[in-house]
Each structure stands twice: as structure tokens, then as C-alpha cells.
Image (tube, helix red, strand yellow):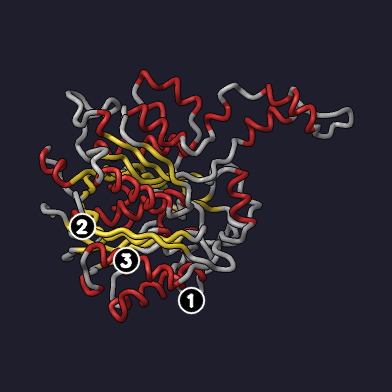
Amino acid sequence: MSRPVAITGIGPVTALGIGIDPLWDALKDGRSGIRRLESFDGSNWGCPFAGELPADEFSIRKIVPKHYRKATKVMCRDVELAVAAALAATVDAGLVTAGCGEGDITIPPPRMGCHIGAGLIAADVNELGAALVTSRDDNGDFDLHHWGREGIENLTPLWLLKYLPNMLACHVTIVHDCQGPSNTITCWESSATLSLAESMRVIQRGAADACLTGGVESRLNVLATWRQQCAGRVVAATSDDDPANLVRPFADDAAGTVLGEGGGILVLESVEHAAARGATIKAIVSGLACTQSIEDNVLTAASAEAIGDAISLALAQANLNASDIDAVVPMGLGIVGIDAGESGGLRAALGAHADTLPRILITPATGNCCAGHGGVQLAVAAQCLATQRLPGTPTSLSHVLVITASQGGQNTATILSKGPSS
């Protein structure tokens, strides 16, 4: 691979907290962040639980620079979480940017890119409803014609800017003054790893020295949660169930997944640039490949053949054999058809070695963070290599495989390798 790239900063944001430490500690202890929904009343929903970041642990106004606080008025939840994750990643990487640290800027802004995966952002129901009720006819029914002529004027002029998927990368680039190439990927759970691929190519072709990359999403609002639950991809549960045991990846009695919010932003740099500034290299991206599953219903099933092809392509790019992989971080959503596709793909590409590999399962602790989930997976894999530990267990790790088999059918296989200081 020309101009090798490295991960030098990791910034996950999940129900367990901001940054790698609370997530890592929970994985070591076997704790889950899945709990009863607080952002709205979900008691009558099919699943009243989610991986939700507690409100008392997060304030976007405390995260952004003082001069940027007015902009928080046009940030939806997804944007807020992305800004928090980007800050955690830049701090972890030891960078000084326009929005982080003191002293001279570490990387010239034109040499810093940004690629962030995002999802379908749902409008705030209270905000939208307050405008919709102004467009009723004489019978009290909603009048679409009145809404188009006059009612829509009751939304704030900048209302739409809160809900465009590219707003995550937009705000992050403004806060940290990233003037290099920027893009947004929207491919369900594969969004974050596909964004990593975009950042990698940008750095390899010399268009940037570093990028903020990854993905973030929150579907914990009435509209998005309703869509997810009605599509049958979330565990059906009652208030009496134990939320910590709802998601059971690869289990015979797996019943589905649970929504989570958050994701992960990483700092990706060329190895030469990271070494020149004395950065700690947490992991090197040695292989990355993408494929597409074609199933009757990619929302609940994944192709073992397509996933296996992605893994094989990543191995070839990294010039590794199946036996060189020391651990795997799968999606492990608890959706039977997708879990089966992952297991089948691992066996197709790695043979019998797949059955002996340690699997690092994240979803039972965080819920499914959708477009941000791959970012969480990558952050944990990098932490494993940097610390030479599986969560709670010291070990020797050279190469960790991360696979995403998204509910949209996009698959990625990423191989992270041990850095020189690990």
C-alpha cells in the first residue's frame, strides 16, 4: 500500500460516555449502557430500551469553543455527538486545532481533511409539530395546501440546516478549521468504515496529511425509532426485561438488535507525518475492502459470500494470510440473518481459523449506533492494538479484523495492524 496511513486518535461517543476510557472500562467489566429511553416516552413501544447517552453527562455548549456557541442552535443531536467525538479524537491524538488545545496549530488547515458517515436525520417532532398545527382547515384537519403557502413559514429560516446529513462534517470542519477534502457517506452501519476508506485515499494521493474520519448517528427520536421498530429490526421487549441481556449476537436465541446513539471519530494520518510530529501510532490501516450483499431483504440478511470476498480482498491488500488475524470485531447486531452472514463470511475467508478467533462484541454494550457503529468498532480495535489487550485480557496482537455488514447491504472489511510503539 502506497503512503501507509495510521490511526493516531480515537474518539468514540456512546451510551457509556465520551472518549475511549468509559467504553473500554465497560467492555472490560462486561457492563452495558442500554437502559430505558429518557429522551421520549417509549413505554408503549415494542422496545422501551436504547443505548442512550445520559442527558446529565453531555452538554454541547461545554464542548464547542465560546465563539461557536451560537451555532449550537442549528445543531441536531447527530451533529452534537459528532462534534463531541471529533474533539475527543483530536485531544487523544495530541493535536492543536482551531477548536482544541493551545499554541501553534499542529497541522496546517489546508492539509487537514474530514469525512464523516451520517444517517437519515429525522426532524424534531416538537419543532415540526408546532409549525404543522398552524395549517388546519375549518374542520381542524391538516391542510397541505395551506402548509405549502403559509404554514411552512412558521419554521425558523435555518431549520433545514439542522437536518442535512453533511452538517456533521460541516460543523466539525468549521470548529477545527479543516480546509482539506471533505465528504459525507450515508450507507448505514458501513458509513464510518467507508468514510475511513475515503480518508485513506485522500491521504494516499497526497491531498491531505491527516483527516478526521468515522461516523455518528442518533435514531433516538420519535420518527426514526418508529421507522426502525416498525421495520422489525429491533428487539421486542417489555419493561420487565433486563436491558443488558437483550442483544445476544450469534446466539441461538438471538431476537434482534437495540438502537444506540453515537459513533466514533478517528484521526487518520500518514505514517510519515505521524512519525515526524512524534505522535503515538495506535494502529496502522493495512487492508480495507468493500463489497455489496444482494439479498431479498438486506435489512435482515447479509451475504456470507460477499462478506467473505471483502475479507479476502482486505487480506490480499495487507499481504496477510488468514492465520495472521488475531481477533475480529464483528457487527454482532443480534439480527439472525446478518449474524449468520458474518459468521459464514468469516469461515469462507479464514477457514477453520475463524472458529478459534476471539470475537469482540460491542453492540450488547452500546446498542446499534447505525451510521456510527463502524466508528465504534474501529476505535475499540485500535485500542486493542495500542494496549495489546482484548477487553480485560492481556494478549499479543498483531492484526485485528473489523467487519461491518450493514442493513443496507454494504459490507466492509478493515484490517488494523500493530503500530511501531505498541
Residue that numbered label 2 is attached to: 385
Residue drawn where x is 52% and y is 35% of the image: 164
Whether residue 393 is situated above or below residue 174 in the rendered picture: below
Where's residue 216, x and y in %? Answer: 42, 44
Residue that numbered label 1 is attached to: 252
Q: Quadrant of residue 66?
A: top left
Residue that numbered label 3 is attached to: 313
Q: Would residue 176 appear left or right of 395 to someone viewing this image?
A: right
Where's residue 41, x and y in %? Answer: 61, 44
Viewer-closest of 415 and 28: 415
Precedes in sequence: disc 3 or disc 2: 3
Precedes in sequence: disc 1 or disc 2: 1
Amino acid, disc 2: Leu
Residue drawn where x is 68% and y is 22% of the image: 153
Q: Would residue 48 appear left or right of 53 to someone viewing this image?
A: right
Where's residue 217, x and y in %? Answer: 47, 45
Amino acid, disc 1: Asp
Q: Quadrant of the C terminus?
A: bottom left
Furthest-bottom residue in view? Answer: 352
Crowding at dot 2, Cα within 10 Å, few <14 / some 14-19 / many 20+, comes out as many
Residue drawn where x is 58% and y is 56% of the image: 47
Q: How far is the residue under mark 1 from the one under mark 2?
A: 30 Å
Furthest-top residue in view? Answer: 67
